[in-house]
Image (cartoon, coloured by chain):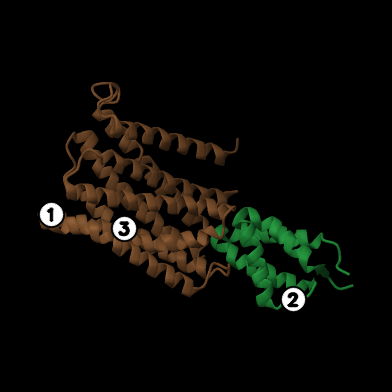
Amino acid sequence: MTRSVRTTTAITAALGAATLILLARTLWPGAGAFSGGALNETVLLWVSALGKVPFLLLGAVYAWRNTRRFEPGNPARPCWVFLSWGLLSFLLAQSVLCFYELFRGDAVPFPSIGDVFFLIGYPLLTAGLLAFLRSYAAAGFPVGGAGERRALAAGTVAVCVLIGIPILRPIVATPAPAVEKFLNLAYPILDFILLVPTVLLLRITFRFRGGAVWKTWIALLGGFIFNFGGDVLFAYLQALGETHFHYLVDILYILAFGLIARGVLYQHELLSD
Amino acid sequence: MPFQRSTKEVLDSINGILSPYVGGLMARTAASAHCRDLGIVGDAMGRGQVDALLGKLGLGLVIFLGKDKTAAVVETMRRSIEDLREAP
């Protein structure tokens, strides 16, 4: 078994275990294991935290190491810098949330200092994906023309508007403090913005299917799609005041950060072989 | 006798080495597109044309693989093309 296969197996096992536990808790909250059993709320909080923070740490560290492996002047280098700083911001944000939940035993205040890091992270990740898009389009591989990318971007924006209106409307209508309302609107909007380069890069990635570049990017972009799903679901449930399904949001984030970490590690393997 | 290699064999050789990195479809279409851009239309290629083609492929690869790995992959392609039999 190669090191790459071992890494994939370990990440898949961690993602699968965390997902199964949290999904079972959502579907059968009254099951013995959850109501006073081995998987009580404290354990579930740890499962949720350990499903996110280590993957973000792995992603941030190895994205930075990828940066160092690209020589100065390589167009990919600044892209990986943006990505590593964006993942570091997310890591700090998630760490703040975990600190409240695990060590203070409190509900996470909203807003918290974690939101500041999230708000810094999104523009960095978006800048990273846009920089990748620009450099991959200029690499000389036949990845489709600018017209095709413009049409796809326009289509993605149109879909975002269609999805966004029903999601954002209850957030606007719900009475809430200004900062809270701002954040509940900001996250989905930042996600929609991040979704545009994600979809454009996905289109490019499909042309590389079967190769190492494909593996790297399908994992990375899959992670961004799951993160989008998590944020949208979080905003929607928050607006509705729904609390029963919050572990579904955690599942989406765990899958997101696990896939992003795997994508970053694939790139590292590609540079290191 | 000047260096001459069959264009089809050169493309097959490049395809075999590039595919694990960029996938079979991209390896094929990238090499063919660069040939078209470089005006390589005949059944055989000279050394200058092979160098130009490898140079173009290397410029694209460097964004995914970095300079050192790209240099190694391009060198593998060059050696593989060198080992092909002379085109008639």
Closer to us: A116 or A225? A225
Residue B4 got which mark? none
Both marks 1 and 3 on one chain: yes
Would residue A64 appear left or right of A99 to someone viewing this image?
A: right
Closer to us: A32 or B83? A32
Residue type at mark 2 is: Val
Q: In whole angstroms, how far apart are the C-alphas of marks 3 and 2?
A: 47 Å
Q: Position of residue A113 (x, y in %)?
A: 20, 50
Q: Which residue is mark 1?
A: A174
Q: Which residue is mark 2?
A: B41
Instruction: Choose mark 1 or mark 2, whichever is in front.
Output: 1
- For the point 9% across and 54% down, the residue is A175
Residue type at mark 1 is: Thr
Lower position in the chain sequence, tag 1 or tag 3: 1
User: Contact (CB < 8 A) between labels 1 and 3?
Assistant: no
Both marks 3 and 2 on one chain: no
Q: Colour of chain A?
A: brown
Q: Which residue is mark 3?
A: A191
Q: Position of residue A219 (x, y in %)?
A: 47, 49
Would residue B67 appear left or right of B7 to someone viewing this image?
A: left
Badge 3: how crowded within 10 Å, few (<14), some, or many (20+)?
Answer: many
Q: In whole angstroms, how far apart are the C-alphas of marks 1 and 2?
A: 66 Å
- For the point 32% across and 60% down, the residue is A192
Q: Colour of chain B?
A: green
Q: Position of residue A64 (x, y in %)?
A: 44, 53
Badge 1: how crowded within 10 Å, few (<14), some, or many (20+)?
Answer: few
User: Contact (CB < 8 A) between labels 1 and 2?
Assistant: no
For the N terminus of chain A, the quadrant is: top right
Which chain does the numbered disc 1 sit on? A
Q: Is residue B29 above or below residue A63?
A: below
